[in-house]
Image (cartoon, rainbow, N blue to C red):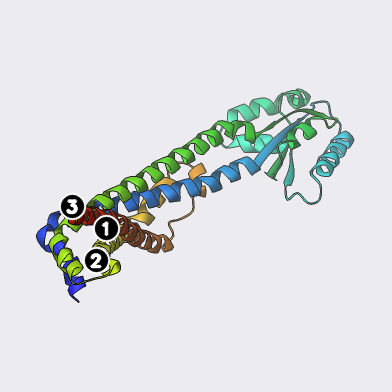
Amino acid sequence: MYLLKLSLRPWRLAPWSQIFSVLAVGFLLLLAGFLFWMQDGLRTVVLRLKGEQVITAYLQPSLEAETEKRALEQIRGVLGAGVGASVHLVDHSEFLGGLKDSYPELVRDLEDLGQEMSQIVPRYVSISGVLPESMVEAVRKIPGIESAETSGDRFRPIVGAFSALRWVARVIMVGICFALFTGLIHLARMNGYLHREALGILRLWGASTMSLMAPGLISGVLVGIFGGLIAALGWLTFGARLGFQIRLLSPILRGLPPFSTQMSWVLLLMGAALGLLAGALGNLSGLSLYREDGSQG
């Protein structure tokens, strides 16, 4: 009981330093949790953008119906039975039907062209699914395919940007944890000076090293737990709203996962662990200095 009272001495003698430290721990842990969620969610988005793609294979305008069927069969053969991709032929009528609502006058002008419409309105095969990067080259070599393009080429700059953003988030997250850990160590050493006289008396009574470190460890754990609790409450209160707003920024970001409530427990345990470790290191350095001073005295 005496060690517990001694560990609460910094809260009585220097309450504001403890309170501001708790607030700083809570905010930095919440920010680190958000960065972890963002870089982990972007990993899913990047994998989806790399794997899922739509290949548009344009058929030659002079292609006959029999050759058209043969080209479709060859495309399905290139894909193979194990590839879960959909193959859909878009002919002249379906292409014009997609434009009719937005551009009715243009559709009427194209329909008035008669046989010449087939030279202007494209026919293409849409292939969508999780496809390898070499698939577009294989489709281009099929007889009757005039050209082929893939959405992967369009998303390649986005994939590069998201990959760079993931690394930036990781670096900032590690920097936040390092700054947080360093601040907790300095707080533990400052609290150690508040325990200095009482620890000296306990040392004269023959207290063990663990007993001498207990007040500092408990003080560090309390700061870490209270900070982790603030981060957990902030995660549960604002996390879902923030994640929802971020997913609304772009259709691509809708692939980000929702905020998990389990992360709140992770933040709480992380705060307690950082407080315990920082308290241990801060008190070890303080005890070594105290022993050097005692031996010189």
Disc 3 residue type?
Gln
User: Which residue is labeled 2 in the image?
Assistant: 212
- Residue 196 x %, y %: 16, 60
In the shown orientation, is residue 131 left or right of residue 77?
left
Disc 2 residue type?
Leu
Q: Is any atom of residue 124 visible in this view?
A: no
Q: Identify whether 54 is placed above or below 37.
A: above
- Residue 85 x %, y %: 72, 47
In the shown orientation, is residue 186 left or right of residue 247?
left
Q: What residue is drawn where x is 27% and y is 54%?
A: 282
User: Which residue is labeled 1 in the image?
Assistant: 283
- Residue 200 x %, y %: 16, 64
In the shown orientation, is residue 279 left or right of residue 6?
right
Q: Looking at the figure, which quarter contains the N terminus?
A: bottom left
Q: Residue furthest bottom?
A: 1
Disc 1 residue type?
Asn
Give residue 67's mark. none
- Mark 1 vs mark 2: which is more N-terminal? 2
The residue lying toward the viewer, choosing from 118 and 156, is 156
- Residue 136 x %, y %: 74, 34
| Circles 1, 2 touching at the beta carbon (< 8 Å) | yes
Give residue 296's mark. 3
The residue lying toward the viewer, choosing from 87 and 150, is 150
Q: Give the CA separation, mark 1 to mark 2.
A: 9 Å
